[in-house]
Image: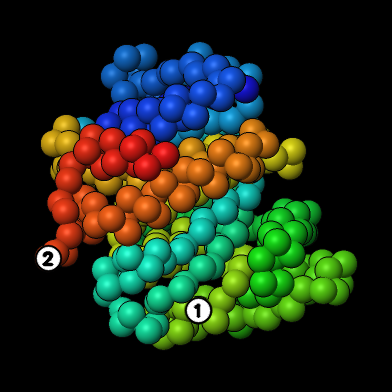
Amino acid sequence: MRVAVLPGDGIGPEIMAQALAVLQRLALPLELAEAPVGGAAVEQTGDPLPERTLALAREADAILFGAVGDPRYDTAPREKRPEQAILGLRKALGFFANLRPARVHDALADSSTLKREVVAGLDLLIVRELTGDIYFGEPRGVRDAGRLGREGFDTMRYSEAEVRRIARVAFEAARKRRRRVCSVDKANVLETSRLWREVVSDEAKRFPDIELSHLYVDNCAMQLVRAPKQFDVIVTGNLFGDILSDEAAMLTGSIGMLPSASLDERGKGLYEPIHGSAPDIAGRGVANPLAMILSAAMMLRHSLGQPEAAERIERAVAKTLADGYRTADLYTEGTRRVGTEEMGRAVLERL
């Protein structure tokens, strides 16, 4: 099983090292090949997604991705920014479906900023469309608007086929869970969302065993804070999904806990923690590696056909948390504060 390993920037290499140690401990027949991406690739080649890296990703059965983002390139041209690497991989390889689970481990229920009774037992899945919407729509740019000065513009667009295929992913995911899907849009304002709601509702007819509901994105944002356990699967577009998935992540106590998968139509995927490169703590050995380790577990389950190995990793993470190990983002009085490597070792011991 060939895995492209793309550590990236900031804390990416630190957390990736811990995930690879876990994979190696499982003694699976994995072929790991590493390549630069993001700011690290710009530094080496001048391109955030070099052709060699893209070729490796194309040939692999799955991609394990750390993080991209480097403040040194904040003022660089758009095509040279590290973030273009992840956007380029999604587009070039057809990774249109982003799965972002948000689960609250019982040991972390008091780490959330919400009351324990609101989040204890939370288990929801956000299915975000990745290759359409305002992030990819054309035309876009900045132009002279005369006496008003410059104006920036982006285009929000979705085709019926794009909406239908992401809805199908959400309904199929719900069949393995609690059989409820909430579609999130802004159909009271946006033409794009009116099409979205119409197509999702039509696709739902093919899944009569799934309960479908609809929410406007602003109401969904409120409901995630008010009563998040009402949700099973949420399906939404690229922009809304970007925002709502980060909100859902913080319900769990730390954005450092949550993995994600980006899948193509055949199940090949790119797996990454949902947090960024965190340049402010890079190199200090304090980053939480659990989201990266859990991303490796998702890779084993969804792309490499190793659900039992994935379950072993997830149980080891849960036991590590239950035994009181905490990185700085999760630390509370009475728990054991550890760094990146020590947290990784604790998972290995329980594995």
Mark 2 neighbour class, 10 Å CA radius: few under 14, some 14 to 19, many 20 or more: few
Q: CA distance from mark 2 to mark 1?
A: 27 Å
From the viewer's perspective, is 315 left or right of 93? left
Whichever of labels 2 and 1 marks the residue nearer the N terminus, that label is 1
From the viewer's perspective, is 147 left or right of 351? left
Residue 260: x and y in percent read 50, 49
- The residue shown at (66%, 66%) is 177
Mark 1 neighbour class, 10 Å CA radius: few under 14, some 14 to 19, many 20 or more: some
Mark 2 or 1, closer to the camera: 2
Q: Disc 2 marks which amino acid?
A: Glu
- The residue where tag 1 is placed is 229
Q: Which mark is residue 290?
A: none
From the viewer's perspective, is 185 left or right of 223? right
- The residue shown at (59%, 20%) is 29
From the viewer's perspective, is 320 left or right of 26? left
- The residue shown at (38%, 28%) is 21
Q: Secondary structure at mark 1?
A: helix
Q: Quarter of the image containing the N terminus? A: top right
Q: Quarter of the image containing the C terminus? A: top left
Q: Is residue 75 above or below residue 253?
A: above
Q: Is residue 330 above or below residue 182?
A: above
Q: Secondary structure at mark 2?
A: loop
